[in-house]
């Protein structure tokens, strides 16, 4: 199956009332782990690459590895997504390469660190939408700023410093015409999200629900949604790792989000922990091993297990065959003739 539009994937998820995990990749094993999980659970899937990933693997390697995944798994709809584009140029280069979806993260300036103004965010995101939609490519925007720093990207801080303002979310969606909207509700990237066990009030779910009520037809996105499971932390630490005690986002909170308009859920850290734990275990317990396959295979299996679990928890499992993917060219026509509306439905307050 050719790569599909993320917009179609999320529209179908909205119809079915489920969420779709968006998993970060940097190499072949991670792509294979995701596809193994998608096959196992019969799930549609979003595979995403950050700027750092594109740099690490080199664009062409990563792109063709994802194309191979599509070719080998014709029954699985796959959207290829640029995660956290920092500028128009980053998104343009992904689109020209063949990505079917991009995130323009205009919540931060181009340096990927400094919070941008609302008007700067609107301007750059709208510019990406105007370039992407005639080419049938989906656009995710972000309003509000997440906490934490990954690979130099992020504003830092706790995640509670720049919570999304629902009025701004409505104005942003109206002025930009984005297909999906990432919001900040106390989430942050990386392993160190919360310093004590979350009690159900750590995330501003009331803000999320308010935004969904005002923008009932806009697909909401939760970033920083790793749950940082204790068992994965323990494996890393048991075999020589030095992770400090930490807690992630409880899956029940994500499921509450899914019941309130969240359609895309970003997960990277859980997979990093799973792979690192598996590799550490082999190298620690069998120090005589030196064939990379001896540790990459268990690492791939550990990641597949995490991804399959999330696919089931987010509800996308079983939905790969629900619909016929349409081509990017047809999606482009839909944007042009207005049948694929980008004007959000705004509910009265
Ligand atoms: O948003 C962050 C993702 O976890 C990707 O992280 O920029 O280190 O590749 P990265
Ligand atoms: P985590 O660090 O919680 O996995 O978040 C990943 C993410 O938001 C990628 O954009
Ligand atoms: Zn993110």
Image (cartoon, rainbow, N blue to C red):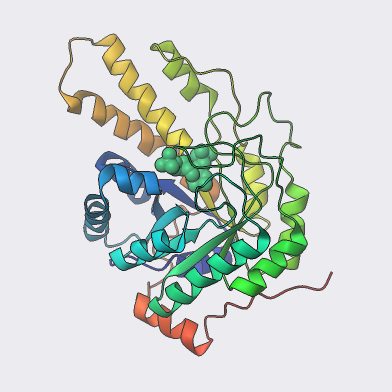
At x 27%, y 53%, the residue is 59
- Taking depth in this image into account, of 116 and 15 the one nearest to the observer is 116
Q: Please identify the quadrant where the N terminus is shown.
A: bottom left
Q: Is residue 244 above or below residue 93?
A: above
* Picture quadrant of residue 18: bottom right
Coordinates of residue 72 in the picture (x, y in percent): 22, 56
At x 55%, y 53%, the residue is 109
Coordinates of residue 147 in the picture (x, y in percent): 61, 39
Q: Please identify the quadrant where the C terminus is shown.
A: bottom right
* Picture quadrant of residue 292: top left
The outermost residue toward the left is 291
Coordinates of residue 304 in the picture (x, y in percent): 36, 38
- Taking depth in this image into account, of 51 and 226 the one nearest to the observer is 51
At x 57%, y 28%, the residue is 192
The outermost residue toward the bottom is 337
Coordinates of residue 14 in the picture (x, y in percent): 57, 65
User: In the displayed structure, does residue 142 sit left or right of residue 45?
Assistant: right
Q: Is residue 109 above or below residue 230?
A: below
Q: Is residue 224 above or below residue 117?
A: above
Q: Is residue 172 above or below residue 311?
A: below
- Taking depth in this image into account, of 73 and 90 the one nearest to the observer is 90
Viewer can see residue 176 = yes
User: In the displayed structure, does residue 79 sit left or right of residue 163?
Assistant: left
At x 59%, y 36%, the residue is 156
């Amino acid at each position: 199956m050719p790569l599909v539009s993320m917009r179609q994937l999320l529209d179908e998820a909205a119809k079915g009332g489920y969420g779709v995990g968006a998993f970060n990749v940097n190499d072949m094993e991670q792509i294979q782990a995701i596809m193994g999980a998608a096959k196992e659970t019969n799930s549609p899937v979003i595979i995403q690459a950050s700027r750092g990933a594109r740099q690490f693997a080199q664009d062409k390697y990563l792109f063709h590895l994802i194309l191979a995944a599509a070719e080998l798994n014709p029954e699985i709809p796959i959207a290829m997504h640029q995660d956290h584009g920092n500028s128009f140029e980053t998104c343009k280069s992904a689109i020209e390469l063949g990505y079917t979806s991009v995130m323009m993260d205009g919540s931060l300036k181009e340096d990927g660190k400094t919070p941008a103004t609302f008007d700067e965010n609107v301007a750059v995101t709208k510019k990406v939408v105007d370039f992407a939609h005639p080419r049938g490519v989906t656009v995710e925007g972000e309003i509000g700023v997440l906490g934490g720093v990954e690979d130099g990207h992020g504003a830092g801080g706790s995640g509670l410093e720049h919570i999304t303002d629902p009025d701004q979310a409505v104005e942003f969606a109206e002025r930009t015409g984005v297909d999906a909207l990432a919001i900040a509700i106390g989430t942050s990237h990386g392993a160190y999200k919360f310093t004590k066990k979350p009690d159900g009030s750590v995330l501003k779910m009331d803000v999320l629900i308010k935004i969904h009520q005002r923008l009932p037809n806009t697909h909401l996105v939760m970033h920083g949604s790793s749950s940082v499971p204790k068992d994965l932390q323990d494996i890393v630490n048991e075999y020589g790792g030095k992770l400090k005690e930490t807690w992630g986002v409880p899956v029940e909170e994500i499921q509450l989000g899914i019941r309130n308009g969240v359609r895309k859920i970003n997960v990277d850290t859980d997979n990093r922990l799973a792979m690192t734990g598996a590799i550490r275990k082999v190298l620690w317990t069998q120090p005589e091993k030196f064939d990379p396959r001896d540790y990459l295979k268990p690492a791939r299996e550990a990641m597949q297990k995490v991804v399959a679990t999330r696919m089931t928890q987010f509800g996308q499992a079983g939905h790969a065959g629900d619909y016929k993917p349409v081509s990017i060219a047809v999606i482009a026509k839909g944007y042009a003739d207005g049948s694929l509306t980008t004007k959000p439905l705004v509910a009265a307050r």
